[in-house]
Amino acid sequence: MTKQILMGMNGDEASAYATKQVNPDVVAAYPITPQTIIVERFSEYVADGEVDTEFVAVESEHSALSNCVGASAAGARAFTATAANGLALMWEITYIASSLRLPIIMAVANRALSGPINIHNDHSDSMGARDSGWIQIYCENSQEVYDASLEAWRIAEHPDVQLPVMVCLDGFTLSHTMENVMTLPDDIVKNYLGEREFITVKGHAGEGELRLNPDLPMSMGVLDLQDYYFEHKLQQVDAMNQALRVIPQMDAEYFELSGRRYDFLESYRMEDAEVALLGLGSTMGTVKHVVDELRAEGVKAGAIKMRVFRPFPVDALVEAIGGLPVLGVLDKAASFGAPGGPLYAEVSTVFYNRAEKPLIKNFIHGLGGRDTSPAMIRGLYENLLSIHGKGEVEEKVIFVGVRE
Amino acid sequence: MSEQKPGWKELPRGAVSTKSSRDYETGDWGVDKPEFDRAKCTKCMLCHFFCPEGAIFVREDGFTEVDLKYCKGCGVCANECPVKCIEMVRK
């Protein structure tokens, strides 16, 4: 296995450092807390001549992503980073990037959307973008941020995928918290990423690589009405299905390289579990800690961390749940007027038509950075155990850690 | 309605256009077209530069002419003409 270097980095620095090793052609970004360190660090790499990147200091996030769209369409590797309202301002361009099949990588330091103004972590920003056609990877710690920030390029640029990827890291909890991160040597990363791959398409001037090239002109992003738009949306649906097939291959390759094995989901002490919590991001580190405590007390508790939320890993989830009797789904985003949080709603959809399914309860927690403590998580497991005893879920969706 | 259009598996990914923008004759969108009074025209070519569709070209003799295959009849040329030699009339 490759010799690695241990570094002390917070999540933002891990993202910036990995991106330095990627040496993308273009980085266009606008500073916003808690993503700011990523762009600050990266601009230092540019100023110090450690990368060949064209750094574009834009006047808004809308321009940041638009810039990446133009750069990526011209054949560049393009990166940006944002959070919360910045992502909201990018909104229309997120859909354009994915529909033009541009493998842009964006770090999202998850932060609560205004208003009222809040700079702390929840998933309301990236959850709102869940239908925008981007692959979404949620990280538990800085190590995962580093690894995902490299692997994302391979997934995005895979000829069968060709989609943009969001690497999501919890604001402050990860973005500003120093951790040990094992890093790969520069030359290994360079070799791992190689050159950007292009697919071949047939445009009006003939067949060639999907990129803007004066020698073979191509029209991208043109008007696409009733008679073609639907077909192009099907291509995006298919690309997500292809990503479901490709991501495990990329995970296996990255394991070979780094010794760190990733998957759609991480099942933690799920064998013989009677109750389990499923969720995204840094909370799952705390959940696993509580599972260890409960297991030591003889409680059959488990946990499932969902790393890849888009594409939604249906088969992997069904397999991970197996015959589990009671599942609690943690959502760090409210979907106003919906039957529950977004993760809960989708997990429930997966199991609705299956004969074997767990009782499912939704815990919406941590909005605006409200702390989800080990004691609180212990309370959630007690709630699940009482459901297991009764055999039914009386209140399907509850908000935890909020004052009445 | 007999034209058989390709399905999603056949179409190029990235919604790349299979036709050049020259092949989309958008001239039939318009109601009006410009008519030039060459007796008044000073050959300043402002209409050529202002046309948002690039549908007004400059002839060998220096006068401008409109390509009705692409003119959408917006009237920008008539509005901008400093000697008011362009009049918008029904197509």
Image (cartoon, coloured by chain):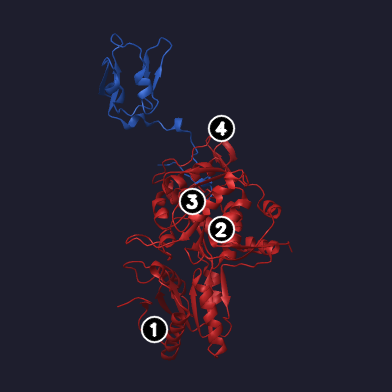
Chain colours: A red, B blue
Which callout, 2 or 4, points to the residue nearer the camera? 2
Disc 1: host chain: A
Which callout, 2 or 1, points to the residue nearer the camera? 2
Q: Quadrant of residue A114?
A: bottom left
Q: Quadrant of the N terminus of chain A?
A: bottom right
Q: Are marks 2 and 1 in contact (CB under 8 Å)?
A: no
For label 2, the SS is helix
Q: Are marks 2 and 4 in contact (CB under 8 Å)?
A: no
Q: What whole-number distance in Å separates the C-alpha atoms at marks 3 and 4?
A: 23 Å
What residue would you read off at disc 2? A13
What residue would you read off at disc 4? A214
- Judge whether residue B67 can be spotted in this image: no
Given residues A382 and A205, the one toward you in this image is A382
Q: What whole-number distance in Å separates the C-alpha atoms at marks 2 and 4?
A: 38 Å
What residue would you read off at disc 1? A393
Q: Earlier in the sequence, mark 2 or mark 1?
A: 2
Look at the picture and state if A175 lies above or below A73. below
Q: Residues within 10 Å of mark 2 (few under 14, many from 20)?
A: many
Q: What whole-number distance in Å separates the C-alpha atoms at marks 3 and 2?
A: 26 Å
Q: Earlier in the sequence, mark 3 or mark 1?
A: 3
Residue A246, horizontal then vertical, whole percent:
60, 59
Residue A248, horizontal then vertical, whole percent:
62, 64
Q: Earlier in the sequence, mark 2 or mark 4?
A: 2
Disc 3: host chain: A
Amino acid, disc 2? Glu
Q: What whole-number distance in Å separates the C-alpha atoms at marks 1 and 4?
A: 62 Å
Q: Residues within 10 Å of mark 4 (few under 14, many from 20)?
A: few
Q: Earlier in the sequence, mark 3 or mark 2?
A: 2
Q: Which mark is residue A98?
A: 3
Amino acid, disc 4? Pro
Amino acid, disc 1? Val
For label 1, the SS is loop
